[in-house]
Image (cartoon, grey):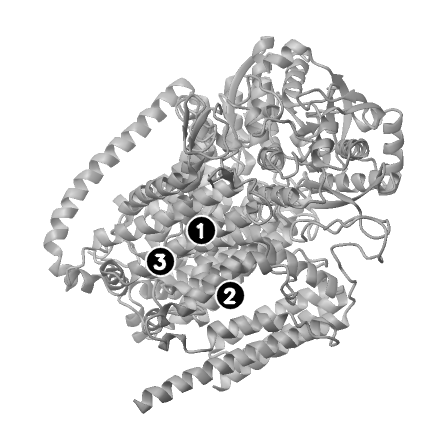
Amino acid sequence: MRRGIIVGGIVAAAVLALIAAGCGGSSKSSSSTSGGGSGGGGNATALPASSCQDLYFEGSGKPDYIVPSDLPLQGSGRTQTIEMTNAIRFVLKQANFKAGKYTVGYQSCDDSTAQAGKWESSKCSANANAYAQNKSVIGVIGTFNSGCAEIEIPILNRAPDGPLGMVSPANTYVGLTHSGPGTAAGEPDKYYPNGERNYIRMVAADDFQGAADAQFMKDQGAKSVFILNDKEAYGLGVATDTKNSATKLGLKVAGFTAWDPKASSYEAVATKIKQSGADWIYLGGLICENGAKLVSDLKAGVPNAKLMAPDGFSDFTANGPAAAGMFITVAGVPPEKLTGKGADFIKAFGDQIGKKPNPYSAYAAQSMQVVLDAIEKSDGTRSSVTDNLLKTDVTDGILGTFSINENGDTTRNPVTVYQQVGSGKSGTGKTFKVEIPSASLVKAA
Amino acid sequence: MARSRDRDTAALQDRGLRMGIGAALLLLALFAQAGFRSLDVAAIPFLAVIALIYVPPWETVPYVGRFARAGIAITIAALYPFVWDKLFTVPVFGSFPSIPTGVVMLVFIQMAVGLNIVVGYAGLLDLGYVAFYAMGAYVAAWFASVQFSQKNVHFLAVGVGSNTPGFHISIWILLVVAGITTAFVGVLIGLPTLRLRGDYLAIVTLGFGEILPQIARNGDNLFGFNLTNGPNGITPIDSPGFFGVNYLTGSGTFWSSARLFYWTGLLLLLITIFCSVRLRDSRLGRAWIAIREDETAAAAMGVPLMRTKTWAYATGAFFGGVAGAYYASFKSATFPGDFFFNISVFILCMIILGGMGNIWGVIMGGAFLAYLDQEGLADSGGWFNSHFSQAGFNRLIGFLLIAGLFAVVILAKDVAWRAGLAVICGVLAVLFFALNPVQLPLEVPKFEFGIFGIILLVVMLFRPEGLIPSTRRAAEFHEGVHDQPLYDVVHE
Amino acid sequence: MVTEASAEPLESTSRFRLSFTAVFGILLVGLVLFWLAVNFYKTPADFIQIFLIGFTLGALYALIALGYTLVYGILELINFAHGDVFMLGGMMAVTVVGTTLFDLTQGEAWYVLWPLIIAALLICMGFCGLLNVTVELIAYRRLRHAPRLAPLITAIGASFILQNIGLAWKGPNYVQTADVLPAGNVFSIGGVEYTWEKLIVLLVTTPVLIILVWLVQRTRQGKAMRATAQDRDAAAMMGINVNRTISFTFLIAGALAGVAGLLYALYAGSVRFDQGFQLGLIAFTAAVLGGIGNLPGAVLGALLIGLIQAFNEGLSWHSPGSDWTQSMVFGILIIILVLRPEGLLGERTPEGG
């Protein structure tokens, strides 16, 4: 009885302390819709705070429409993705939150969880449903990971009031937009159940990257390559594409196997690779699947082999202490090679964040620009915005001049090869070469 | 006669008192939330409804008394989609859960009820429940998507073009098929564990819970056959439908997609609860209680041990499979990365928090934890970050640590406890004031599994029978059971 | 009395089970040996190299497995949190060895490196030992007489709390340790390279094991541990302070986990908050494989599991590949628990007959 009272007293005291400290402390009024008085503007309802951050809109009242971004904001890629959200905000602010006669707001939504450290299918699905059900959402920028896009595209495709359009700054899995030797049966049609396309992307697909990588290795004198993958959607896809391209080029594929992200040591795998006699090793996967340890062990176990990786390893500061000298490709143009509006963006945005922007920020910025243009030309409905997205034709934009074909792919597909210089926090990539692979090689990938 | 009336009045007064205190606390919290200025009157009808379910002695009404509370609760749950955004703002958590969150909550409650059969009724600690969830999801995926595009079989599927390749069987049929297949898998998983004692059984089920998702991940090349499409998962999965209305698009604002999924989920949950209650009160249920409390005595009384345990796994797996299939159809995708050990523990946590063996406890625990997982932690994190500055947070932690130190001194029964807790409080105090380790803004969802771990620890230590206990289980925990399995192979 | 009454049916079933087990076991072992022999014939140098890699890995697992086995022997409890204590030890090692405390980098002189590594070792051992004792005090002590379900669940709860502490401490990504151990080979014969790192792991593990065996067999505390493991009530009647003995056991187990954590951080080089659970299960499998409660059994089991892992990933003739490593380890666990729960080396030594 006495203990019960004491326990109850302590609990009540703690609760009151919570309320008291809360009331006394600073209370910035967090509202999920911006403040501002009455009149003007539209009546957008913001997306819920459990997945998305606050609405970004600096006009009076509320905007007419919302464009959310769906990116993984936790885990190893977070420096890249957070910078991408800032780039999107930058572009929106420059456009003064207007797309023609409509006002547009932005929300940054997260499709990852802290425990997984990367995207999670239930979050992707929940986010896509939220976008589809919220009438104010008129276009979506996302996703970063191809697996998440595989879930979201069909849901957005069947959204009420016409398919909801999605622009991806970073998805590279081939099967999302067209089929090829590396895709599964039924792709891409299975992602568009109502028959209309509603997805475009700003980057080259993995068949380009795989072809470019194989071409690069062959040009650098590779005799045989051992291809590893991380058994995830993106990694397996890009590794398969590289394998197909290498076979077509006559480059011997000494082995094709997976690495286990949860393993304590990759020395055994290194021994296997050494035994196979490969002089190049290709790491198809993401850095956050224990990629840094893999690179260290491979460097130690197979010292004479050269390492190459696609854009899963594109965060140079995260590649671990042994990564110096490895080649990394990114399906895109390096920031310093952008011209015109692109160069202006890099300079202005770089000044705002105080460092050189990473390659994906330009892609995110271009995505927002493309969405704004599509909204401007539309009549305010989802289906017309989606139609406009598929007819995108950009002249001297941030990424230069390109257009979107009927599959949703971009017509400009450079692949840049970087070489890692330094490692750890000071790691950067030195641009080595820009590859544009031949069309026949891409078809075979 | 008089004594039973006194007892009834006493119970009524007791419930009334508890309701009153709860209502007063809620109103106080709402008042505080509004800065002690105004009172949210939307809370009053809400409290009235809760009081209506809880306080009156419904069980005394003849003929329908037993079902009154359940009936009212079901009606309220069914009407929830119409009122969820018009209810008051909950302190700390913000809004009530949205309908899609409600669907996920219903799925997880269903899984919890299923696991309750294995853990709560039969006392078999199953740490691999995620394997059943995965099996159900993949069965739905195999027969309602373009996975096996070599064939083209359509059967009562709604909303799928007729020349889409692959199997497209109606989801309603698939729910049953998934349940039966998963029950079969459950029997297979259970068979090796029949003679093992509690902890080994837990580990073996854990092992299966890890092996099945790995088979799903590697399943794109099983001797050349693409069974599960590997890490790319199987997407999209068809949605259920009837009378030409497909659940993914819904039909208008009344029969919207989210509401359709919600009501169907509620219906599935009700069927599961009904089955669980009937099982509990059946001969099989009593056999489960017997083997849970004393295997040797049960065997001596003629309870067929192996068959009873196998039935526990089969039924638990059945409901897990149905829930998994429905969830896969709702998400319209299934990936091998969806299935991991923490989910099994998450469902176990629901049962333990709510009350092992007691269905209503499991439902309450399941609803609360599923809500926390989906929306609650993020919402409360948002509230927390907007109401606390770094200094305020440190002050709060300091206050709690000092309160903890007092609690240790007064409450801890033995020196060891006092020492251990004092060490922890001391170390944490040093950490907080010297190193300022917790930077605001706090990402509360990051601490999700730590919070569940604390729930498991605190509940098991102080109230192992859970919040809404079954009296039998409470007695078992406090008085002890004869834990030795009959075929304990270590003691020869 | 119960066992006597059911002796008859048990005998017949156990005889049947024994022959089934024996046949199955012999077939399985034979298949594995055949596969190893073919690989050895094809690539002998690589085989030996991979053998050495697996042996070193096994030594690491042995340290963790011993912790499991000690605790199980005395409490009959699977301490799920043990793997996470190891993981926190690894994180403490990363903090201490890296930039926070000692700031070691590659190529330090041996008179700077080794005293600091020994200091780090003591810090990690102390930290993990205290952590383990605290976990026991909070999570298990009160449930000494509760149904077996209860401490198992609190063990899982403690495991999750420790994982979350790791997540909050170092974040969700893999944390790299700087390469401070001397690089280069001890010897390199015919294509087989044996690096200093591997030798150092063995050089640290072996004395620790010897000290542990001495502790359990020759000291009074060790005798108390063995007595408590055999029969707790009788030990109490003999004047042994059961609570203190159990705390001491947890301290030793924690210290072992601390050593393992430091070695892991130095050798494997990357730590993540969820690795403890993973490696803990592997170590538990090793302990069960060798015979739970049996100290040499834990070491044997760990070496076997380390070798199996390495062979699976490294050999090239018909090896299942790293896709299936986890499934294989769990498969071994299930097969052992179902068919031969007493493990390879048989009955628990602390329990005696």
B120 w.r.t. A345: above or below: below
The quadrant the C terminus of chain C occupies is: bottom left
Using the image, name the chain to which the residue with label 1 belongs: B
Rendered image: mark on residue C282: none
Q: Which residue is mark 3?
A: B274
Is disc 1 placed on a helix, strand or loop? helix
Is disc 2 placed on a helix, strand or loop? helix
* Residue positioned 36% across, 76% down in the render: B61
The residues tagged by marks 2 and 1 sit, at their Cα atoms, a distance apart of: 26 Å
Left or right of A44 on screen, residue B130: left
Give whichever of C1, A321 is nearer the camera: C1
* Residue positioned 40% across, 75% down in the render: B58
Q: Are marks 3 and 1 in contact (CB under 8 Å)?
A: no
Q: Nearer the viewer, mark 2 or mark 1?
A: 1
Q: Which residue is mark 1?
A: B344
User: Can you tell which quarter of the image residue B134 is in?
Assistant: top left
Q: Residues within 10 Å of mark 1 (few under 14, many from 20)?
A: many
Question: Label 3 sits on what residue type?
Answer: Phe
Tally of numbered discs: 3
